[in-house]
Image (cartoon, rainbow, N blue to C red):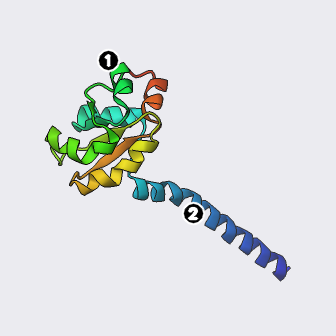
Amino acid sequence: MNFLTQIDNLALIALMLVTGTALFLPTLSTLISGKGLSPTEATIWINRRKAAVIDLRPEGEFKAGHLPGAKYVPSNEIATRIEKLKLDRKNPLILVCETGASSRKAVAEVQKLGFAEVATLDGGVQAWQAAALPLVK
């Protein structure tokens, strides 16, 4: 009986560790790669928090359709081009690409430029379109 109790306790401890790890992984991902926003959260940031939107996709894709108010900045020129936009570093900044992968890579570089709060659009423009939100040409 005592042996079975120890096995039950070990199983509970293992379950607790697995659950804790599963809960912490999204937080760890956010700490490493910046905050990811759903299309709804991005809309709230844009409308209520005056977030600037930077589109890192190739120029042709940007011209074909982009988020309302987005500014085009090539991902390989992000440091120099953001400086020219003269954005308020106190306001949030949302980085956008096609799927969210390229924008996550640019977060650290933008944070080094002194922006207090930088986020990416999870799923990128594809997620924006999937949420039936408008693109501007």
- Residue 87 is at least partly visible in this image: no
- For the residue pair 12 and 101, the one nearer the viewer reads as 101
Q: Residues within 10 Å of mark 1 (few under 14, many from 20)?
A: few
State whether residue 57 is above or below residue 136: below
Tell me the residue at 76%/71% (across/down): 8
The quadrant in which the N terminus is found is bottom right
For the residues labelled 2 and 1, the Cα–Cα distance comes to 45 Å
- Residue 89 is at least partly visible in this image: yes
The quadrant in which the C terminus is found is top left
Residue tagged 2: 20
State whether residue 118 is above or below residue 6: above
- For the residue pair 96 and 84, the one nearer the viewer reads as 84
Callout 1, which amino acid? Lys
Q: Can you name the residue that lies furthest to the bottom here?
A: 2
Please name which of the two marks, 2 or 1, marks the residue nearer to the observer.
1
State whether residue 50 is above or below residue 9: above
Callout 2, which amino acid? Gly
Which quadrant would residue 7 be assigned to in this image? bottom right
Tell me the residue at 41%/47% (across/down): 104
**Mark sitting earlier along the chain (2/1):** 2
- Answer with left or right where residue 72 lies relative to residue 124: left
- Answer with left or right where residue 110 lies relative to residue 11: left
- For the residue pair 14 and 62, the one nearer the viewer reads as 62
- Answer with left or right where residue 7 lies relative to residue 132: right
Tell me the residue at 36%/21% (across/down): 65
State whether residue 22 is above or below residue 49: below
Q: Residues within 10 Å of mark 2 (few under 14, many from 20)?
A: few
Dot 1 falls on a residue whose secondary structure is: loop
Residue tagged 1: 137
Dot 2 falls on a residue whose secondary structure is: helix
Percent coordinates x, y for residue 63 in the rendering: 33, 22
- For the residue pair 40 and 70, the one nearer the viewer reads as 70
